[in-house]
Image (spheres, grey):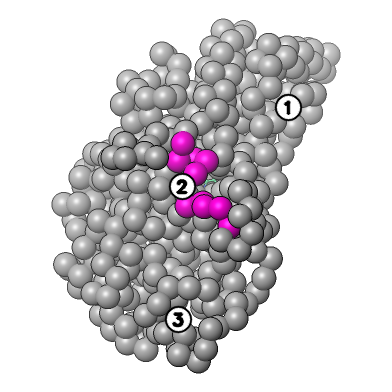
């Protein structure tokens, strides 16, 4: 059908990883709602458990519906393999788990989703891991933060909530020079807008919860491996390069090459951490991914229009959207994500915290929820919600200060959304005047 043609993104988002069901011919990928799979015989079972043959054993590790989603996302990101898991936060742990041991650290961007700052600054300490947060626009600071115990560099391509855009290639060069993998959280951009692996990233993590599913129905995550990192070069990644005691001494890198990280993620990560994505959730995400490009184009068009309107509004101090010509990251965004800077941004209200809260309570089409990447437009005040656990300094570094409102622009009629923002801004200001 296709000869040597390289298939386009719009074709792959529908077809990659899927084929008509061999048992029934079903065109849509069936939901394999099963825990276990009958072995052909004892020899087959042993081969599967030895990873000598690839197949299905138990749905904590592998499931045919989830496998289609894994192949689809790996293809869209240009990776060698992918492992799905139960949430975006699970994906971050799954990405770090094969790389880290007690005493190891990661160097992470200050501009991250609030939950990730908490996970990295507090919770991973229980594993004996730690994170050093630096401004990824300061490449010397990234270099200086790396030491002998550093095992990864971590940042968001387009950062939640501020819409800051990372110079992925520049940070990848720093990681390369230090012999370390760069992990990019590509949740906010999606592979349609940004291709971190082409810019030098080793691993890509996703919250499937957001744009990939796209309608607020699923909690899920995914880790994609580029397949290009040499896990054996430095001796720093013994889980992948040395005999893995958790899998009867198997040497993953030597045995599986470009698929070492993916096999480790399934055979050890999912097996022992158990953060599995269920097949029903994988089905919903597969349905979402089929229309990813259409939705992202619309999210971007609406966000550009609304950000430009907000920027001129007298109650608004500033808008941080890299799609606006006024943004300091506008030129970088054109290079790093040429199809658009996404649908997520923040704006500041001149009247501060109280005006933000009144504004949030006044919107009608926008929903006040702790989520993003929905077809519906969403709004939240990070300082009183998602970024509440952060110190004031961390809030400001993450562009989540008290005067900041975050919007996730949906795919509704842009003029309806502007009318809703307009009436809410008027009501926020009106109540302030009356007080
Ligand atoms: C939501 C989010 C996460 C966490 O994903 P969950 O699916 O909620 O666990 C991580 N990174 C970013 C950028 C997010 O927006």
Q: Is mark 1 within 8 Å of ligand 1?
A: no
Q: Is residue 20 magenta?
A: yes
Residue at (47% x, 85% y) in the render: 44
Whether 3 is among the magenta residues is no
What residue sits 28% from the left and 84% below the top? 243
Across and down, in percent, residue 193 comes to: 43, 32
Residue 210, by quadrant, is: top right
As drawn, 311 above or below 92: above
Q: Is residue 101 above or below residue 12?
A: below
Q: Earlier in the sequence, mark 3 or mark 1?
A: 3
Which residue is situated farthest in the bottom direction here? 42
Q: Which residue is mark 2?
A: 16
Question: Which quarter of the figure has residue 137?
Answer: top left
Find out if the beta carbon at label 2 lies less than 8 Å from the nearest ligand 1 atom: no
* Residue 192 vs residue 16, the one in the foreground: 16
Circle 3 SS class = helix
Magenta residue span:
11-21
Element type at marker 1? loop
Q: Is residue 252 above or below residue 87?
A: below
């Amino acid at each position: 059908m296709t000869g040597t043609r390289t298939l386009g993104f719009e074709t792959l988002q529908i077809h990659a990883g899927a084929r008509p069901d061999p048992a029934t011919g079903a065109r849509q990928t069936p939901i394999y709602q099963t825990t276990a799979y009958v072995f052909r015989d004892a020899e087959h079972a042993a081969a599967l458990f030895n990873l000598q043959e690839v197949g299905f054993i138990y749905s904590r590790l592998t499931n045919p519906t989830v496998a289609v989603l894994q192949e689809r996302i790996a293809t869209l990101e240009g990776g060698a393999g992918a492992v799905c898991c139960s949430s975006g936060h699970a994906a971050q742990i799954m990405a770090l788990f094969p790389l880290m041991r007690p005493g190891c650290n990661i160097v992470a961007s200050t501009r991250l989703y609030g939950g990730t700052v908490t996970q990295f600054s507090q919770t991973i300490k229980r594993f004996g891991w730690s994170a050093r947060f630096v401004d990824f626009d300061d490449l010397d600071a990234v270099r200086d933060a790396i030491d002998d115990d550093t095992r990864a560099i971590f940042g968001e391509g387009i950062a939640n909530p501020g819409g800051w855009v990372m110079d992925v290639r520049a940070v990848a060069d720093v990681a390369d020079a230090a012999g370390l993998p760069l992990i990019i959280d590509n949740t906010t951009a999606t592979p349609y807008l940004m291709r971190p692996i082409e810019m030098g990233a080793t691993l890509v993590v996703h919250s499937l919860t957001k744009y990939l599913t796209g309608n607020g129905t699923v909690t899920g995550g995914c880790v994609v491996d580029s397949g290009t990192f040499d896990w054996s070069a430095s001796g720093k990644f013994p889980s992948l390069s040395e005999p893995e005691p958790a899998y009867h001494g198997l040497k993953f890198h030597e045995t599986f090459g470009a698929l070492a990280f993916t096999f480790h993620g399934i055979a050890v990560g999912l097996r022992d951490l158990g953060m599995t994505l269920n097949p029903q959730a994988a089905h919903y995400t597969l349905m979402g991914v089929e229309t990813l490009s259409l939705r992202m184009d619309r999210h971007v068009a609406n966000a550009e229009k609304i950000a430009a309107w907000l920027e001129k509004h007298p109650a608004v101090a500033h808008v941080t959207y890299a799609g606006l010509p006024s943004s300091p990251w506008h030129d970088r965004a054109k290079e790093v994500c040429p199809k658009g800077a996404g649908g997520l941004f923040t704006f500041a209200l001149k009247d501060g915290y109280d005006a933000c809260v009144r504004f949030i309570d006044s919107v009608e089409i926008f929903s006040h929820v702790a989520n993003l990447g929905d077809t519906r437009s969403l709004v939240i005040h990070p300082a009183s919600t998602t970024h509440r656990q952060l110190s004031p300094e961390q809030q400001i570094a993450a562009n989540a200060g008290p005067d900041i409102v975050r919007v996730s622009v949906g795919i509704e009629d842009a003029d309806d959304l502007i009318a809703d923002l307009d009436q809410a801004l008027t009501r926020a200001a009106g109540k302030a005047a009356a007080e």
